[in-house]
Amino acid sequence: MAVIGARPAPRIIGLGRRPHSRPHPVARTRARSAPRRRARPASVASILVTIAALAALALFYLAQSTNVAAVGYQIDSLERQLSDLRSQQQQLLVRIGQAESPTVIQQRATTELRLVPIRHSAIGFAPTSTDSSLK
């Protein structure tokens, strides 16, 4: 592998290779091609079209980012509303549990409905059909 700009190592007399004869550079002849056209400066119309396209892309980007921000605010609002509704649901479940407890039912029956507990002596049971006294 040759290194660009490197010089060959000096030759020690009697050792090494013979020096190679270098070929003489051959003058290259250029093939004539069509004359090159110089790049024209961009016309005013193409510059205006480019600016209009960039402005349209910028407006599209702004519209999309605004829309994303608005949707984010809606999501935050709905999550807050969901949290409030779950809290209300928990409170209602606690109130239902309290209202269904036997002590609360008995207290409401005696105070609001003015019901009194029944005496045990007032409870009578019907005889069973296997009773011999009924025959």
Image: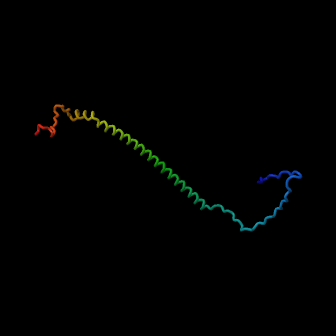
Residue at image position (72%, 67%) is 35
Residue at image position (40%, 44%) is 82
Q: Is residue 135 above or below residue 48?
A: above
Q: Is residue 65 above or below residue 134?
A: below
Q: 125 and 43: which one is in front?
A: 125
Q: In the drawing, does residue 85 fall left or right of residue 111?
A: right
Tally the marks: 0
Q: 79 and 129: which one is in front?
A: 129
Residue at image position (69%, 63%) is 38
Q: Position of residue 128 (x, y in %)?
A: 16, 39
Quarter the N terminus occupies: bottom right
Q: In the drawing, does residue 111 fall left or right of residue 40?
A: left
Residue occupying the far right of the picture: 13
Q: In the drawing, does residue 29 fall left or right of residue 64?
A: right
Q: 108 and 82: which one is in front?
A: 108
Q: Position of residue 50 (x, y in %)?
A: 58, 58
Residue at image position (86%, 56%) is 19
What's the colour scheme? rainbow
Q: 49 and 7: which one is in front?
A: 7
Q: In the drawing, does residue 14 fall left or right of residue 115?
A: right
**Quadrant in the picture for residue 129:** top left
Q: Is residue 62 above or below residue 90?
A: below
Quarter the C terminus occupies: top left
Q: Position of residue 87 (x, y in %)?
A: 38, 40
**Quadrant in the picture for residue 52:** bottom right
Q: Position of residue 5 (x, y in %)?
A: 79, 53
Residue occupying the far left of the picture: 135
